[in-house]
Amino acid sequence: MSQNNANAAAQPADLALSYPSPLKEFWQGFSHNKGAVAGLIFVAFIVSCALLAPLIAPYSPIEQYRDHLLTPPAWAAGGSAQFLFGTDELGRDILSRLIHGARLSLFIGLMSVVMALIPGVILGLLAAFFPKALGASIMRLMDIMMALPSLLLAVAIMAILGPGLTNAMIAIATVSLPAYVRLTRASAMTELNRDYVVASRVAGAGLLRLMFVTVLPNCMAPLIVHATMSFSSAILEIAALGFLGLGVQPPTPEWGTMLASARDYIESAWWVVTLPGLTILLSVLAINLMGDGLRDALDPKLKRAA
């Protein structure tokens, strides 16, 4: 009798050991991808620099040192230890501008994703729940938007609204909207045929509860992965708009604006162009690698056995 009780008491413990917590299971799937872990570390570094920019930046991003125009980086010939990454054509410290530019570039990317995600999810759910009344109209509008090149559409929106930080976020969010709508609709249409949704309908769940409590949580995995990928795309698009002079306006430090102001010095001062471009490249690559890890960890079909 005592042995049976001991076995019964041991069974819950064995079950707890055999079924890890969701957070632990997620980390096991994510950490299996070494590139995703490296991307996470780099993204965490960039975010930390952006948050602590006023504390860690050696100089003000708009302060000009007229005696040090186009000073090379400290490791190059003619460089100065005073300016680790050198200075630009106006004598501003490039390292300080990169650190402060990270704050603005990441903020624009994040806000653009949020501004596209929320209406995209709502429109996608409406298209899935009302395929005849609203679905056809919404999806045809999204098809028209996707038929236009994203950068061209963003430039057209900026030409109408005018250059500026807020308008740039609106333009990038508008360009990203169709992908969220299509992804939400496809995921929701799949979930609508599940037994738990039918059971919720029979139990008397209202429309809003079905949409946002029953169906939406089960559509979040692909949306999270896509939002991560679109975050890197938003950084590239704001850099492109800044390079064209339609994004953030000088002297505000932003990676694309730094490239635009330095394009006349590609041959004479390589560091003025290379360092902002390399920062954009590494940041986008790190976010994409992190997105691959999220896909591996959240998609049941791609989860690897621990």
Image (cartoon, rainbow, N blue to C red):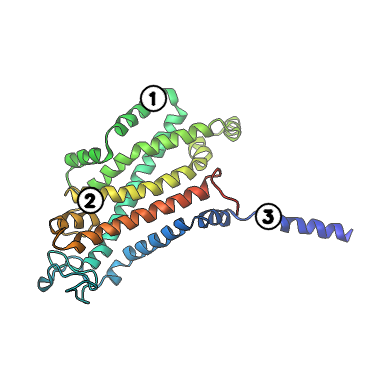
Kindly identify which residue carries mark 3.
18
| Residue drawn where x is 22% and y is 70% of the image | 73
**Mark 1 to mark 2: distance in Å?**
34 Å
Kindly identify which residue carries mark 1.
136
Give the quarter of the image for residue 10.
bottom right
Q: Quadrant of the N terminus?
A: bottom right
**Mark 3 to mark 1: distance in Å?**
46 Å
Q: Which mark is drawn over residue 165?
A: 2
How far across and down, in percent of the image, does residue 122 sit? 41, 37
Structural crowding at the residue carrying mark 2, measured as other residues with C-alpha within 10 Å and reported as few (<14), some (14–19) or many (≥20): some
Front-most of 123 and 241? 241
| Residue drawn where x is 18% and y is 39% of the image | 160
How far across and down, in percent of the image, does residue 25 sit? 58, 54
Q: What residue type is labelled 1?
A: Ala
Q: Which amino acid does label 3 sit on?
A: Ser
Q: Tag 2 or tag 3, which sits nearer the N-term?
A: 3
| Residue drawn where x is 10% and y is 71% of the image | 66
